[in-house]
Amino acid sequence: EAGVVQSPRYKIIEKKQPVAFWCNPISGHNTLYWYRQNLGQGPELLIRYENEEAVDDSQLPKDRFSAERLKGVDSTLKIQPAELGDSAVYLCASSLDPPPSGKNIQYFGAGTRLSVL
Amino acid sequence: RKEVEQDPGPFNVPEGATVAFNCTYSNSASQSFFWYRQDCRKEPKLLMSVYSSGNEDGRFTAQLNRASQYISLLIRDSKLSDSATYLCVVKKNTGNQFYFGTGTSLTVIP
């Protein structure tokens, strides 16, 4: 079974340009997460979806970041305009909630490494 | 105060050594606990869940101390392939939000 798929793997843009990331979660997973990970830090949540509803976007910088999860499956995260400080790895994760047995487990995609010049 | 705190290291240990990492969490309502492993330039992957009674998986032992609000990971007989960053992850008992520590960097030296 395919894992969480993200694209692109790498993106280099100039500041003030827009950029978009795409994520396809594991089939059947209803919860989808977008994280940002800076070098030497752990992932920090940007937004969490339960099906198509954004249930936690308190850490999403809404002046420039937006996300959507139409139909409750794949999701896109957009930054417009990008700033130098947005350079990071953007990770998507998914989970099945409630879990069929045991504990909630998140599965991560390989991430998109963004460099803003 | 951060939800989850870890010593970032780095820990440099020789092959065959035993190494332990600790992690503290701030919210006593936390319910689920995990250790994730992250290789350089790769995504985090679940290493093991942490159960209240402690649990072992081969050379890895995880323990939870709810009274002191800390979690530990013990690695015995370290292998070169254990070199990675180990992320402590905590989930509260409401909602599906996971909190990550900064990670502890481990390098196993030949």
Image (cartoon, coloured by chain):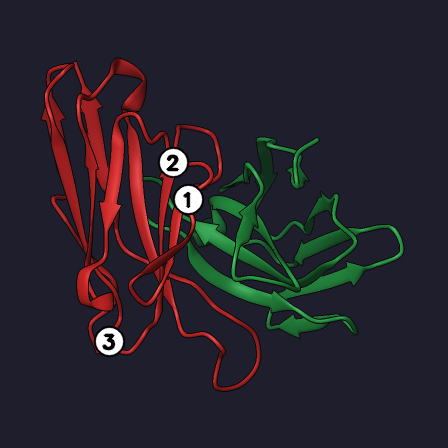
Task: Kindly state the secondary structure of the residue where label 3 is placed.
Answer: loop
Residue marked by disc 3? A27
Residue A98 picture location, percent across and down: 49, 78
Question: What is the three-letter code of the residue carrying label 1?
Answer: Asp
Between the C-alphas of marks 2 and 1, the distance is 5 Å
For the point 30% across and 36% down, the residue is A89
Mark closer to the chain start, 3 or 2: 3
Indicate the chain on which mark 1 is placed. A
Q: Give the colour of chain B.
A: green
Q: Which chain is red?
A: A
Q: Residue at x 77, y 71 (%)?
A: B52
Nearest the viewer among A71 and A23 is: A71
Q: Amino acid at mark 2?
A: Leu
Percent coordinates x, y for residue A12 in the rendering: 11, 25
Q: Which residue is mark 1?
A: A57
The answer to whether residue A43 is above or below residue A81 is below
User: How far is the residue under mark 3 from the one under mark 2?
Assistant: 25 Å
Kindly identify which chain the residue marked by label 3 belongs to.
A
Q: Classify residue B97 as left or right of residue B41.
A: right
Q: CA distance from mark 3 to mark 1?
A: 23 Å
Q: Which residue is mark 2?
A: A60
Residue contact between numbered discs 2 and 1, judged by CB atoms under 8 Å: yes
Tell how many labels.
Answer: 3
Query: Which tag is nearer the camera, tag 3 or tag 2?
Result: 2
- Looking at the image, residue B65 sits to the left or right of residue A80; the answer is right
